Amino acid sequence: MSGFRRGIRLGVDVGTARVGVARCDPDGLLAVPVETVPRGDEAIARIAQLAGEYDAFELLVGLPISLSGNETSSTADARSFAQDLAAVTGLAVRMVDERLSTVSAHAALRGAGRSQKSSRRIVDQVAAVVLLQQAIDVEKSTGTPAGALLPGS
């Protein structure tokens, strides 16, 4: 586990209607769901509040890139949201490739016997768990933090 930075991180899955939030323990053993925050004027403030409550040192925001590797309007939206989070929290924010995190979340929920409709309220949290766990695993295996540090954060 050399090179792993100890501390709590929040994973943030930015959607157009909802934002999923997950956290990990200080040793990065397990990412767990925290909350689904409605997307709106209070979303940044609520996530900043959660970061404070959990004493997070870093935020990992999912960067939605198309399967072909191209950026989309969702990519720009996630970057803008991440910049707002960095400005409000003062924390380091890393943009992490989240290709397939929502797909993986839906598959996991289906595997647990939940329909897509009954999963709607929690799929964003599960997607945040998936992206956070992947980022933790990358850092543990390589000694290098996952994703790209948002400039100025």
Image (cartoon, helix red, strand yellow):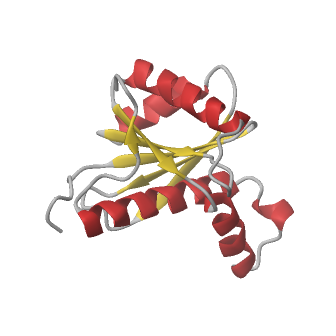
User: In the figure, 11 relative to 79: above or below?
Assistant: below
Horizontally, is 18 left or right of 81 in the view? right
Horizontally, is 147 left or right of 43 in the view? left
Residue at x 40%, y 36% (from the top left corner): 51
Quadrant, the N terminus: bottom left
Rendered location of residue 75, percent (x, y)? 63, 37
Rendered location of residue 22, percent (x, y)? 49, 52
Q: Quarter of the image holding residue 126?
A: bottom right
User: In the figure, 54 relative to 22: above or below?
Assistant: above
**How many marks can you see?**
0
Return the residue nearer the eye: 133 or 69.
Answer: 69
Q: Quarter of the image holding residue 31?
A: bottom left
Return the residue nearer the eye: 138 or 41.
Answer: 138
Residue lying at the far left of the rendered structure = 2
Rendered location of residue 99, percent (x, y)? 61, 57
Residue at x 44%, y 30% (from the top left corner): 49
User: In the figure, 141 relative to 70: above or below?
Assistant: below
User: In the figure, 6 relative to 94: above or below?
Assistant: below
Rendered location of residue 80, percent (x, y)? 57, 25
Residue at x 36%, y 66% (from the top left corner): 137
Q: Quarter of the image holding residue 92?
A: top left
Return the residue nearer the eye: 99 or 28.
Answer: 99
Quadrant, the C terminus: top left
Residue at x 39%, y 42% (from the top left corner): 148
